[in-house]
Amino acid sequence: MSLTQNIRKDMFEASKSGNTVHADILKLVLADIKNEEISLGKELSDEEVIKVIRKQEKKVKDSITEFTKMNREELVARETEQLNIIEKYLPALMSEEDITKVVKQVLAKTDVQSVQNMGLVMGLVMKELGGKADGNTVKGIVQKLLS
């Protein structure tokens, strides 16, 4: 069963059990997946679906940060619940140690020595990791290794 089918099944189960909040969040996830499929003109693979969900996860985390700054606890609680539901469909992120190994491999292949070429390295590393690592974590590791 594909990840999209699994999300759809869980959405229907949440609707049937009366858990409208859970069902609504999964409907938003499915809508984002469908929008991406329409823009690409093809059905998404599980890896591509994970990238879509990671984008949504980042938006929710940003919202939590902003709502926390504004002392809007009810909105923080709502967004945290949404984050918990979304994260159930994402694989665990790689450890910093594993990310560092990948970055070192990419640096060895490209022979980049300067922070000026950081964009090139970031692109290659993120492609290699395929959504299994947080971009900010990767950025920090790349900067550390290039400086």
Image (tube, rainbow, N blue to C red):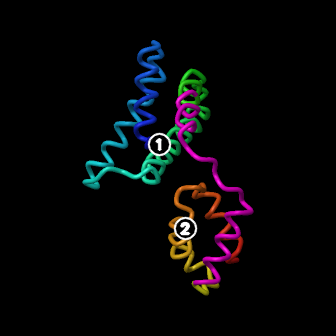
Q: Report the residue marked by disc 1.
A: 56
Percent coordinates x, y for residue 68 in the rendering: 61, 32
Q: Is residue 36 left or right of residue 140?
A: left
Considering the numbered disc 2 on the image, is that residue within a helix, a strand or a loop? helix
For the C terminus, the image quarter is bottom right
On the image, which quarter does residue 88 sit in? top right
For residue 111: magenta? no
Q: Is residue 61 above or below residue 121?
A: above
Decide which of 113, 89 is in the foreground and name it: 89
Q: CA distance from mark 1 to mark 2?
A: 21 Å
For residue 105: magenta? yes
User: Magenta: predominant secondary structure element?
Assistant: helix
Magenta residues? 81-109
Q: Is residue 39 above or below residue 79?
A: below
Decide which of 65, 91 is in the foreground and name it: 91
Q: Is residue 30 left or right of residue 107?
A: left
Amino acid type assigned to the residue bearing label 2 in the image: Glu
Percent coordinates x, y for residue 83 in the rendering: 56, 34
Residue 128 marker = 2
Considering the numbered disc 1 on the image, is that residue within a helix, a strand or a loop? helix
Percent coordinates x, y for residue 14 in the rendering: 46, 20
Q: Is residue 39 above or below residue 31?
A: below
Amino acid type assigned to the residue bearing label 1 in the image: Gln
**Direction top: furthest residue:** 18
Identify the residue at horizontal 57%, vertical 58% (top origin).
135
Mark 1 vs mark 2: in front: 2
Residue 13 marker = none
Q: Earlier in the sequence, mark 1 or mark 2?
A: 1
Identify the residue at horizontal 27%, vertical 52% (top origin).
39
For the N terminus, the image quarter is top left
Identify the residue at horizontal 70%, vertical 63% (top origin).
98
